[in-house]
Amino acid sequence: MSAKVSRRRQSALRRYAILDTPKEGEFDDIVKFVASVCETPVALVSLLDTTRQWFKAETGLGRSETPLSQSICVQAVQVGGFVEIHDTLLDPLSCDNELCHGEQAVRFYAGAPLIAHDGHRLGMLCVLDMQPRTLTALQRRTIEVMAVQVMRLIELRSALARVDVLRREVDHRVKNSLASIAAVVRMQAGRTDHPDVRSALGEVQSRLTAQAALHEQLVIGNDSERADLADYLARLAPPLLTLLPEGVRLDVTAQPIELASEQLGRVGLIVNEFVTNTGKYAFAPDATGAVTVSGEWLDDDTYCITCTDDGRADEAALAAARDSKGLGARIINAATVSLGGASEWTLGNPGLRLEFRVEG
């Protein structure tokens, strides 16, 4: 094999990023299966690096790599197809190999190349024995078929890695975009003297913050489409606190419950609307008090979320909260209905109380 082709093989191996990766059950199962069918003590998935052959999977050898000087594969891969050496001491591909001499000499070798989609031969799926022998037609066919499966596994893990990199890049851009939009809204709110415009922009900013917290909870460091509500509310709390008067604290406590992303988003909207409206209407600018968001299991099937404040409230405030004409009320009603229930507003002692339920 020419030096140029060898360099291309190294480039292909680096592209797959498979060298020195941990053991994986799918590859281990293949070498064990091939060794069993061929009745050989050793089977290997051998990948040919610059100065060594590295084994993605092996059975019966007990080593993860050997120098190329001890590799029959480095010679066999040049053949381009299936290779069977009935007696390594009598074959020019192997007779000078130090692996074929001594007490534990390899006297039999058979293997099929691992051929990438672009034609590069990355290594061999091979079997070894310490005595000369001949494979049956079924055994030879088994090695050839399983070599194709090994290469498909290598291609698959590479494709999944590329998808993961792309997903993380998209996630990073979404996070930056949400932060940029929130910053623009915040600057616009600071430039206007109109209280209604400033209030509207503040609500937009709080909703963006809720979505950013949801995105971070679901995506950053989490490969699942479900996440824990308690963690999500903990991430949501700091930005929501900025919507309240300086003397009002925000207490968030929730028992663990894993919810789908759609459910988390709806819970976030409800909590966001409650805190936003409380900050606007329930407390005087210099007031002290508390807003509480809690979640708990009522029984094995029922999880209840409660939002309360200890601000000023009366029957008129309760009626306004229940009024479906307001934007906040419409958002809360729509979100609770989509969660499979309804919002229940009551007067606290003091303040307002909102209760709704979710199914895990």
Image (tube, grey):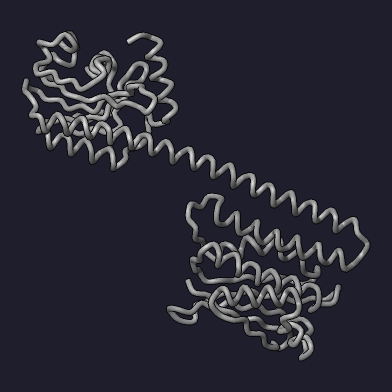
Asked if 120 appears above or below 18 in the picture, the reply is above
With respect to residue 215, does 98 lie above or below? above
Query: Which of the 4 image quarters holds residue 320?
Result: bottom right
Residue located at (66% from left, 85% from top)? 345
Residue at x 80% of width, y 55% of height: 185
Quadrant housing the N terminus: top left
> Does residue 127 appear in this view?
yes
Residue in view at x 9 percent, y 27 percent: 135
- Which of 160/348 is in front? 160
Q: Position of residue 75 (x, y in %)?
A: 24, 14
**Is residue 193 toward the left or the right of residue 182 in the image?**
right
| Residue 334: % across, % down | 63, 75
Question: Which residue is at 71% across, 71% downward?
Answer: 273
* Quadrant of residue 107 within the rendered picture: top left
Outermost bottom residue = 315
- Is 326 situated left or right of 269 in this image? right
On screen, 273 above or below 182? below
